[in-house]
Amino acid sequence: MNYVIIGGDAAGMSAAMQIVRHDPTASVTTLEMGDDYSYAQCGLPYLIGGLIDDPDQLVARTVETFRRKYKIDARTRHEVTGIDPTARRVFGEHFDLTYDKLLIATGARPFLPSWEGKSLDGVHTLKTIPDARRLLRELKQDVDNVVIIGGGYIGLEMAENFAARGKQVTIVERNSQLATIFDPDLAEHIHAEAEKNGIKLVFDQEVQALGGTKRVEEVVTDKQTLPADLVLVAIGVRPNTDFVKGSGIELSENGAIKVNAFMETNLASIYAAGDCATQYHRIKERDDYIPLGTHANKQGRIAGINMSGRPRSFKGIVGTSIVKFFSLTLGRTGLSKREAEQHGIPYQAVTAELPQHASYYPGAEKLLIRLLYQPNTGQLLGAQLFGRDGVDKRLDVLATALYHGMTMQELEDLDLAYAPPYNGVWDPVQQTARRK
């Protein structure tokens, strides 16, 4: 069986490893448009901030490892420009390959609007190791004022890491809050943390142009002009699927490839996984697009298992994510109020601020928890958590509860770990659930 995989990162190589393990006679070719395979994109901000010394620390397996140890024909600088599903072939500028089964795992690219000045030196996006290397080179120059356009997760992480390098950081956000995946009133805690750490926040302003001669010198919004020695654009990503248009592969509105639970597209023998594909959302009960490394690795694994003839379905996502922002940890899973309203899902919410462990034990910190639930059944719909310690533990409990459709009462019944350094006799999640 001749397998071709387009994309050499999380989804693509997770699939490739499953095919190698389950089909010993497989011929596997992977096509990567860049030079780097299997690297941790989520670690790039910490490389910029200096917590990670060397980009090579972010590489899980090198190209040579895939070639020599796993006998995968792992190719670099092979950008696929088209697919012919009838002839079962993929092609690029210097190559033309046939396949029995094909996986599209091309990920996503940062979105950069057609602003005047977007090509000036000093204007960056961050998605790949080469992106990070360019940023690191420029930060060694005379860079003081950094403007980040976009207040999502990447914007927050990069604000912290630019600040760690002693830069003056401004975040420009078109909305009235940072991190719009959280409820607006809760986002005020993020704003306070930003301002406490010297981050300037600019809300409700649209960037219209980037100014300068050869190098960027300013960011022009619809209300003011901000000085900038370096600009990072972090306003979201778009699926890398332009090359499949006209092939007959069905796409969603945003360009992500539609897949079923087995990672199959609408065309025979063609699969898709990761940031270029849709993900089924268990709470919304519909396809969604939430591009995260966790989903990419799972979908890639499922795709590889199915391609090698062992049917297994992808069970979907519940929208879980977490981010560190200075001393604050932000976590969420399921639906926010805005999402519930957008999808016409009735909800009620309960919010509590409680110590993350026994209040008498030294070091107790407040943990803010908001739970959304279905009014009639009590079924959990979503959760948002803010705190300095203990967020990750509770977030994963709530994500598991969401996955299994648990109710608020069933949260109370959980047998959770207790000792004074770690918890109270009633976990904060359970205490919050009891307040509904």
Image (cartoon, rainbow, N blue to C red):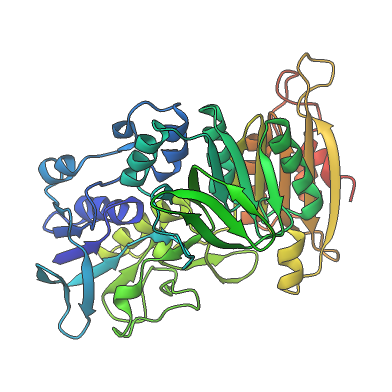
Residue 349 higher or lower than 344, as above or below: above
Residue lying at the far right in this picture: please name it: 435
Name the residue furthest front: 213
Q: Vertical placement of 364 versus 311: above or below?
A: above
Q: Horizontally, is 369 left or right of 303 in the view?
A: right
Q: List the single residue furthest toward the top.
A: 362
Q: Quadrant of residue 422?
A: top right
**Up/down of 326 relative to 62, above or below:** above
- For this rendering, which residue is in front, 319 or 398? 319
Residue at left 77%, top 61%? 337
| Quadrant in the picture for residue 264 | bottom left
Q: How many marks?
A: 0
Q: Is residue 400 visible?
A: no
Q: Quadrant of residue 353?
A: top right
User: Foreground residue, 414 or 379?
Assistant: 379
Q: Quadrant of the N terminus?
A: bottom left
The front one of 52 and 348 is 52
Name the spot of residue 51 as percent of width and height, x first: 45, 26
**Viewer-side residue, 418 vs 152:** 152
Q: Position of residue 343 (x, y in %)?
A: 71, 73
Q: Can the viewer see residue 116?
A: yes
Residue at image position (34%, 81%) is: 249
Identified at 86% across, 50% down, the residue is: 350
Q: Position of residue 135 (x, y in %)?
A: 39, 40
Where does the image place residue 84, in percent across and percent down from the top left? Answer: 20, 81
Residue 99 appears left or right of 396: left
